[in-house]
Image (cartoon, grey):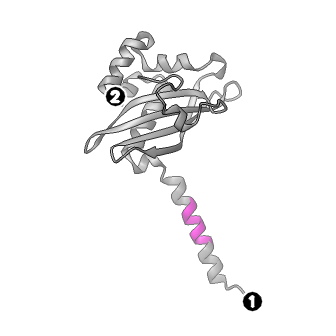
Amino acid sequence: MKIKPLYVGLVVLAVASIIIITATLVPAQLNPAYAVAETFVKAAGNGDDVTAMAQLSAELQEYVTTVCPQGSVSACIDAYTPPDWGNFLNAVFRRSQPDGAAAWDIQYLATYAENQGFSGVCIYVRTEKVSDAVWQVVRWSGWISCDEPNAGLSTLMAADAPNAAP
């Protein structure tokens, strides 16, 4: 049986299209719940307290101002990670699950300083919809090695998760 070049071309085009769509349409571009969570994680990790605080619910903002060192989101996050991990570099979406139409439980995988730090840091963020176009971070936990037995999404969602706020 001889395979026609047209069929081979169509299969190659379909595979290339799937790869391009997957690479360009990450969850933050498809759902505002993800965008808020990603903005928070990256801002907090990079020490941008103004941006990080703007993503938080009023209750979580109050928690930060009363519990975190100097009332700083990034100071809370920095306190979770050992100094030998180095500086935060980036976080990428790992997995998520919806909790109804107005809440998402999202996990990120972070990387810290190259040639010095650590990669495979699991972070959990819960976002909730407060109005038609507004989502806020209402809870976080984690900032722990993904090798830890309590680093999975379901465990980080629990009330007794490591570094849970609030």
Q: Is residue 32 left or right of residue 38?
A: left
Tell whether label 2 touches label 1 (CB within 8 Å).
no
What is the secondary structure assignment of the residue under circle 1?
loop
Magenta-span inclusion, residue 36: no
Alpha-carbon distance for marks 1 and 2?
A: 62 Å
* Residue 77 on image: x %, y %: 50, 21
Instruction: Judge whether 84 appears above or below 104 on screen.
Output: above
Highlighted magenta segment, given as a residue range: 12-19
Find disc 2 in the rendering and name its residue: 54
Magenta-span inclusion, residue 16: yes
Question: Residue at 53% of width from left, 56% of height from top?
Answer: 22
* Residue 36 on image: x %, y %: 39, 37
Q: Is residue 84 left or right of residue 103?
A: right
- The type of residue carrying mark 2 is Ala
Q: Which mark is residue 1?
A: 1
* Residue 160 on image: x %, y %: 50, 24
Lower sequence index among marks 1 and 2 = 1
Question: Residue at 37% of width from left, 44% of height from top?
Answer: 32
- The type of residue carrying mark 1 is Met
Q: Is residue 80 left or right of residue 74?
A: right
Q: Is residue 153 left or right of residue 115?
A: left
Question: Residue at 54% of width from left, 53% of height from top?
Answer: 23
Q: Which is nearer the eye, 94 or 72?
A: 94
